[in-house]
Amino acid sequence: MPELPEVEVVRAGLAPAVAGARVVAVSVVDARSLKRHVPEGADPGTGGHGVTLSPEAGAVRSADFERRLTGALLGAPARRGKFLWIPITGADGAAPRESLLAHLGMSGQLLLRAHEASDDRFVRIRLWIEHPEHGELRLDFADQRRFGSLALDALQLDGESPVPSQAAHIARDPLDPAFDDRGFVTALRSRRTAVKRALLDQTLISGVGNIYADEALWRARLHPETPGERIGPGRARDLLAALRAVFAQALAEGGTSFDEQYVNVNGQAGYFAHSLNAYGRGGEPCPRCGAPTRRIVLGGRSSHFCPRCQRRRKFSR
């Protein structure tokens, strides 16, 4: 699943092409990619992850989505954790009240194309946009496994930041200037759960998935099963710094691509997979000490670590 670096790469790639663009037309090819979209006047509880749409419900959502988005003026894309959204500017120039919200799921892709470009494989929703500087473009939402989605969602304030209502429940991510370092350290150290589980809890810290959790724990020399309450303040700050360093390197290298399911807006794969020190390296030598890297299952997910560099012990710093 795309994690923070991959979603940020997509956001940055979209920004020049969509900020200030107007949506000329919209075509929903597969309404299943609107499972998070709630039509006007419908019960908000009818949308969300895992929703199964009947053909009738799909037709209603498609018509509502196409009608409301056609003619919309788009703002600068924003992101929190793994959620990405494009604010929709009011016709009177007022502050945006809703957004085009994208969740990429396992294999979602937002691809910028010329109008005359051939169809992208697994395209589910297509937008034709017109930008005052870049002219006419097409924005395709492609999704092989259909776990991702697009939706029109109301914006609400979180402090001074407008956030879609469907993303308001998640914590800020460590690249957010308003991220509360002290609050994170305190919350992590109050937990008895394994530190790897804590890093994957999007209500504690967002944007971290399996890949970058393993990499940050390797850099911080922390065993993934170490309880949060056994990690001292200094070690917790080291872990946060390791997360930011991993994210920075992944962003510089375009994210992590193991297959064709994650690409940037131009269809290009990232190459951070070549820089991984722990994730997916079970049985291979640790790049730091040479000991065989181990793979365990923690919370139903694979975790990779070095048993020599990341020994499970009590930390007090």
Image (cartoon, rainbow, N blue to C red):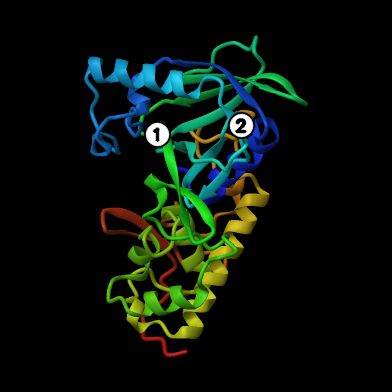
Looking at the picture, which amino acid does disc 1 mark?
Gly
- What number is the disc on residue 21? none
Can you give x and y, in whole percent of width and height, for residue 207 in the image?
47, 54
The answer to the question of whether label 1 and label 2 lie on touching residues, with beta carbons closer than 8 A, is no
The answer to which image quadrant residue 66 occupies is top left
The answer to which image quadrant residue 149 occupies is top left
Report the residue that reaches farthest toward the right: 133
Can you give x and y, in whole percent of width and height, for residue 41 in the image?
29, 29
Q: CA distance from mark 1 to mark 2?
A: 16 Å
Q: Which residue is located at x 42 percent, y 57 percent?
A: 283
| Earlier residue among tags 1 and 2 | 1
Q: Which residue is located at x 37 percent, y 45 percent?
A: 166
Report the residue that reaches farthest toward the front: 92
Side of 86 where 166 appears, left or right: left
Instruction: Give the residue pinned by disc 2.
Output: 265
Can you give x and y, in whole percent of width and height, for residue 27 in the image?
47, 15
Instruction: Give the residue pinned by disc 1.
Output: 148
In the picture shown, does residue 299 fall above or below 57? below
Q: Which residue is located at x 65 percent, y 9 percent?
A: 116
- Mark 1, Cα crowd under 10 Å, few <14 / some 14-19 / many 20+, is many
In the picture shown, does residue 91 fall above or below 308? above
Side of 178 where 203 appears, left or right: left
The number of discs equals 2
